[in-house]
C-alpha cells in the first residue's frame, strides 16, 4: 500500500473556507507579494480621521454581536443515533473483536468506525456496549495506522494503541512491541467518568484515556498492511453525502451560512446542550468536498480563557452571531458568546501556518483572549 501523499491546500478554497478578511495574512504565509503602498504626499484618510477616534470606539462598541447566548443545543435523538451508527459502518478490527451482536450487524464494544483516508479513520464511542442501544455519545475518536512502538506513536493525544487482530476486544488493548494496529485519540463530548479516571472529566481531549505506553525507545513504524475488513481510503461522494445529511444542525446565524446554506467547509451536530461535533471539509460547500480534513468538537462559552476547556488544544473561538463567517473568528469583548473549537487533523495538510500532521492542530487559527 502506498501511503497517501500530502496534498497542498488550494489558496482559493482556503480563503473561502477561512474568511476573506484573513487574506493578507494568508497571502503572506503562502508567499504572495503585497501590493505596493501609496507614496503620494497627500493627506492619508487615517490622518484625517484621527480626531474621530473616540466616535469610532463608540461605534465599535455599539456594533458588538453575540452578547447573548446562542440557540440551545440538544442531545442526540434515537433517530440521530441510529443514523450515525448506520453511517459509521467500517470494520477495522478482526471478527473475534466484534463481540457485540446487534440486530443490524456485529460491533466492537461501544465503537463504530469510518475510514477517511488510506491510513486514518474516525470513530464514535457510545455509552453502551451495543451501539444500537446507545442513549448518548461519550467520545469522538480518531485512529491512525501504525505499530506498537514509541516511534510510531503520533503524539501525546494518541494515548491508546489497539491491535487490529486479537482473540477478543480486551486482548487487543496495547500489545507486544511491533504489533500492528491503530493509535487512537479520544475527545470527550460530555461529562463522563470511566474506570481509568480519578474523577469525572468535562468535554476535552482525554489525555488519560486507557494509556498503553509503548516500550521506551522502541523503534519501527509501518502502515503498509491491510485492515482485516478492508475499506481503507477517503470518503466516497455517497458516504460524504450521508454524513452531511446527519450533521444537520446550525448554531451560527444566517449571515454566516455563506456556502450554499452551510457555514463554509463545516457541518455540525449537537450532542448536548453545550457541545457540538463537526466535520471540516476541503471545500467551502460541503456537498462538493473531496476530502475530510478535520474532525472536532465545539464547547459553548464566552471569549474568556476561563471558558476555554484546554488552552493548548481549543485554539479557536467563533462567535455564534456575526455579519459574515470571517467576522465570526475570535471576539472583541469577553461578554461575547460562541464556541471554543478543537480541530484534529485526519490527514497530513499544508496550511498557511505550516505543515500539519495527523493529530490536534495546536496552531489552528489561534484567537487568544486578551
Image (cartoon, grey):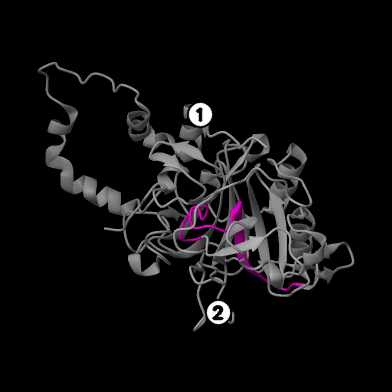
Q: Earlier in the sequence, mark 2 or mark 1?
A: 1
Q: Is residue 354 left or right of residue 153?
A: left
Residue 324 or 51: which is nearer the viewer? 324
Q: Residues within 10 Å of mark 2 (few under 14, many from 20)?
A: few
Residue 68 in the magenta stretch? The answer is: no
Q: Is 75 situated above or below 14?
A: below
User: Marks 2 and 1, how far apart in space?
Assistant: 42 Å
Can the viewer see residue 69?
no
Where is residue 245 drawn, in percent x and y?
Answer: 73, 49
Q: Tag 2's secondary structure? A: loop
Q: Is residue 14 left or right of residue 88?
A: left
State the residue lying farthest toward the left.
Answer: 41
| Picture residue at 48% right of the left edge, 68% below the top | 207
Where is residue 31 drawn, in percent x and y?
Answer: 34, 25
Q: Is residue 319 left or right of residue 129?
A: left
Q: Tag 1's secondary structure? A: loop
Q: Which residue is mark 1?
A: 10
Residue 34 or 163: which is nearer the viewer? 163
| Residue 286: quadrant of the picture | top right
Residue 109 or 179: which is nearer the viewer? 179
Q: Which residue is mark 2?
A: 196
| Residue 39: quadrant of the picture | top left
Which span is picked out in magenta?
Answer: 134-157
Amino acid at each position: 500500500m502506498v501511503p497517501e501523499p500530502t496534498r497542498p491546500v488550494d489558496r482559493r478554497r482556503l480563503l473561502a473556507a477561512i474568511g476573506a478578511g484573513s487574506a493578507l495574512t494568508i497571502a503572506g504565509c503562502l508567499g504572495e507579494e503585497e501590493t505596493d503602498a501609496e507614496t503620494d504626499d497627500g493627506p492619508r484618510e487615517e490622518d484625517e480621521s484621527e480626531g474621530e477616534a473616540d466616535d469610532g470606539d463608540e461605534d465599535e462598541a455599539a456594533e458588538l454581536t453575540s452578547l447573548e447566548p446562542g440557540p440551545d443545543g440538544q442531545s442526540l435523538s434515537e433517530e440521530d443515533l441510529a443514523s450515525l451508527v448506520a453511517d459509521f459502518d467500517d470494520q477495522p478490527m478482526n471478527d473475534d473483536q466484534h463481540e457485540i451482536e446487534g440486530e443490524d450487524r456485529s460491533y466492537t464494544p461501544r465503537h463504530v468506525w469510518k475510514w477517511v483516508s488510506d491510513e486514518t479513520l474516525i470513530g464514535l464511542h457510545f455509552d453502551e456496549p451495543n451501539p444500537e442501544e446507545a442513549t448518548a455519545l461519550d467520545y469522538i475518536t480518531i485512529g491512525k495506522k501504525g505499530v506498537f512502538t514509541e516511534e510510531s506513536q503520533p503524539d501525546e493525544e494518541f494515548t491508546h494503541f489497539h491491535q487490529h487482530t486479537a482473540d477478543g476486544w480486551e486482548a487487543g488493548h496495547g500489545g507486544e512491541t511491533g504489533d500492528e494496529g491503530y493509535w487512537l485519540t479520544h475527545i470527550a463530548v460530555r461529562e463522563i467518568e470511566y474506570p481509568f479516571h480519578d474523577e469525572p472529566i468535562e468535554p476535552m481531549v482525554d489525555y488519560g484515556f486507557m494509556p498503553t505506553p509503548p516500550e521506551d525507545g522502541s523503534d519501527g513504524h509501518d502502515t503498509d498492511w491491510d485492515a482485516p475488513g478492508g475499506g481503507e481510503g477517503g470518503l466516497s461522494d455517497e458516504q460524504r453525502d450521508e454524513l452531511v445529511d446527519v450533521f444537520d444542525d446550525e448554531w451560527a446565524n444566517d449571515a454566516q451560512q455563506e456556502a450554499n446554506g452551510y457555514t463554509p467547509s463545516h457541518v455540525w451536530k449537537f450532542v448536548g446542550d453545550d457541545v457540538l461535533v463537526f466535520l471540516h471539509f476541503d471545500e467551502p460547500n460541503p456537498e462538493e468536498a473531496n476530502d475530510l480534513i478535520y474532525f472536532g468538537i465545539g464547547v459553548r462559552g464566552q471569549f474568556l480563557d476561563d471558558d476555554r476547556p484546554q488552552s493548548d488544544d481549543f485554539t479557536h473561538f467563533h462567535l455564534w452571531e456575526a455579519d459574515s463567517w470571517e467576522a465570526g473568528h475570535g471576539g472583541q469583548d469577553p461578554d461575547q458568546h460562541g464556541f471554543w473549537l478543537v480541530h484534529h487533523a485526519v490527514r497530513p495538510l499544508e496550511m498557511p501556518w505550516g505543515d500539519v500532521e495527523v493529530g490536534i492542530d495546536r496552531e489552528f487559527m489561534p484567537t487568544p483572549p486578551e
